[in-house]
Amino acid sequence: MNKLIVGNWKMNGGMASNEVLLGSIVDGLFSVSHAQLAVCVPAPYLAQVQTRLQGSALAWGSQDVSAHEQGAFTGEVSAHMLKDFACRYAIVGHSERRQYHGETDEVVATKAQRALASGITPIVCVGETLAEREAGQTEAVVKRQLAAVIHAVGHCTSELVVAYEPVWAIGTGLTATPEQAQQVHAVLRAQLMAASQKANRVHILYGGSMNAANAASLLAQADIDGGLIGGASLKPADFLSIAQSAKA
Ligand code: PEP
């Protein structure tokens, strides 16, 4: 299975700088042999990204999706709307949304359901805080977060992408060691396999300060099928270099 390397731009970008960033990534795609790439961009730029990337090998997606189908939900963006811009992916349950917007496991699960119903692959983020890790709760936390989604999506479990993102490693420069990450990925793989026989094809991404220097050792782990990249995805050379570290 090819690795999947997804950029999460977060709330960064602008019409002019997006053009440069996308152009540089597309120009460098020839140098990547064993990874599929995607960028998850702020919703207002989806039209620009669709126009720029149509016909290229770089896929795109959103950073969130509404848990509601349509109606009086001011400020929300529905899965149906994202589909209008040909989004292939939607990140759901990013720790910044859980932390700053109070998203519960149930809300995240509903968002995953909404995405799937519109033919969009949800990238379901799970991960423990530093306090939870220190209290020995890492496995219990990520299993609880993933269980809510599996319960909601049922036989579509094999259509998910899962991202293990230890909260203490996001944007901090701290990275889980390859062994720490692999240990959690193996737990998630077992949970997915128990839910669906086809779950061996689910990409389980690692996210949390992944960069050009540490990507190869993380991506070499048996159950690390790619990366969700924040800060480094805004630097085309670094993003491409991470993707180049994926080996067959
Ligand atoms: C993220 O936002 O999903 C992320 C992993 O960020 P960073 O790579 O900057 O830690």
Image (cartoon, rainbow, N blue to C red):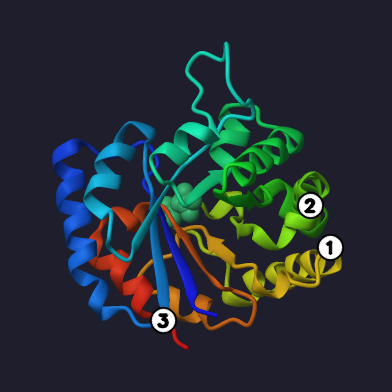
Q: Residues within 10 Å of mark 3 (few under 14, many from 20)?
A: some
Disc on res. 195 = 1
Q: Secondary structure at mark 2?
A: helix
Residue 88 higher or lower than 69, as above or below: below
Q: Decide if ligand 1 comes within 8 Å of the CB at mark 1.
A: no
Towards the viewer: 160 or 18: 160
Q: Earlier in the sequence, mark 1 or mark 3?
A: 3
Disc on res. 34 = 3
Marks 1 & 2, CB-CB < 8 Å contact = yes
Instruction: For marks 2 and 3, give the CA distance.
Output: 28 Å
Q: Is 216 left or right of 22, judged from the image as shown?
A: right
Q: Is residue 21 in sight in this rendering?
A: yes
Q: Earlier in the sequence, mark 1 or mark 2?
A: 2
Residue 138 higher or lower than 247, as above or below: above
Q: Secondary structure at mark 3?
A: loop
Q: Residues within 10 Å of mark 1 (few under 14, many from 20)?
A: some
Instruction: For marks 1 and 3, give the CA distance.
Output: 28 Å
Q: Secondary structure at mark 1?
A: helix
**Quadrant where the image shows the N terminus:** bottom right
Q: Residues within 10 Å of mark 2 (few under 14, many from 20)?
A: many
Marks 1 & 3, CB-CB < 8 Å contact = no
Identify the amino acid type marked 3: His
Q: Earlier in the sequence, mark 2 or mark 3?
A: 3
Identify the amino acid type marked 2: Ile
Towards the viewer: 176 or 84: 84
- Residue at numbered disc 2: 150
Q: Quadrant of residue 190?
A: bottom right
Q: Looking at the image, which residue is at 73% across and 69% down?
A: 199
